[in-house]
Amino acid sequence: DSLYREDQFYFSITYNTLMDKPSGLSQRKFSSGFSGGFLRDMPINKKRTVAIASGIGFTYNNYNQNMAISSTPETPLYTIVDSEAKYSKNKFSILSFDVPVEFRWRTSTYENHKFWRIYGGVKFSYLIYDRSVFNNGQDKVILSGNKDFNKLQYGAYISSGYNTINVYAYYGLNSLFKSAKINDESVNMKALNIGIIFYIL
């Protein structure tokens, strides 16, 4: 069909790092992320090689680092764990509902579904669940519903490659936290997630 659209399901796997970290904060272990969803393709030129797409999806990200979150979800306390201290787990995880909007360029035709592509856009995410865990072997603190997380997060992303598998990068344009502080220093960390994304027709 010469009036084809590249409507696609997508699934991504990323390595997650944190930008604009407060003093003393460092990441340990591997931090991963997973996302999936559906994109509706809307071609805007006659050859249908240029398009706009939007859709819905979900993202789960976790960040292993040395900022312990304790107390309660209503009055969370943030501290940097000393580099000499031993602990088995310290991370926070977030699950969000996503609305991506992207501009697309590709070399596709209605006869060939294997093509080069460059897709880029913005993703709006609404936080639906958060969880932080700190375990030093003696005490285990688990919190969810942390009031300091930004409910609405947004960022820019790009993906590029050939056929099903493509490289992917996302950079958060606003902070993961809206009001968290460590010793009166605001925690304004942003997400940088790099990995691969799969597109399935």
Image (spheres, helix red, strand yellow):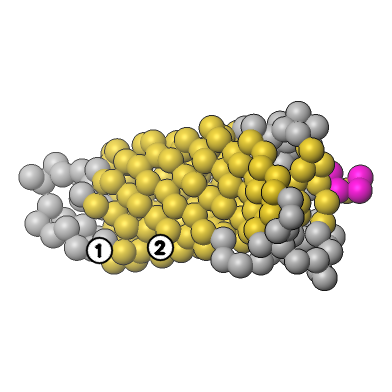
Q: Callout 2, which amino acid?
A: Ile
Q: Position of residue 192 (x, y in %)?
A: 59, 57
Q: Position of residue 100 (x, y in %)?
A: 44, 41
Q: Position of residue 154 (x, y in %)?
A: 58, 41
- Which residue lies at the image location 21% right of the left edge and 57% below the top edge? 108
- Measured Cα–Cα span from mark 1 to mark 2: 12 Å
Q: Quadrant of residue 152?
A: top right
Q: Looking at the rendering, in which quadrant would you find the N terminus?
A: top left
Crowd class of label 2 (few under 14; some 14 to 19; many from 20; radius 10 Å): some
Q: Quadrant of residue 27?
A: bottom right
Q: Position of residue 112 (x, y in %)?
A: 13, 60
Q: Callout 1, which amino acid?
A: Asn
The label on residue 149 is none
Say left or right for 115 vs 75. Answer: left
To which residue does mark 2 refer?
196
Residue range in magenta is: 180-184
Say left or right for 176 vs 7. Answer: right
To which residue does mark 1 refer?
163
Where disc 1 sits, the SS reads loop
Residue sitting farthest toward the front = 138
- Which residue lies at the image location 57% right of the left edge and 43% below the top edge? 94
Say left or right for 107 vs 157. Answer: left
Q: Is 65 within the magenta?
A: no
- Which residue lies at the image location 79% right of the left edge and 38% below the top edge? 71
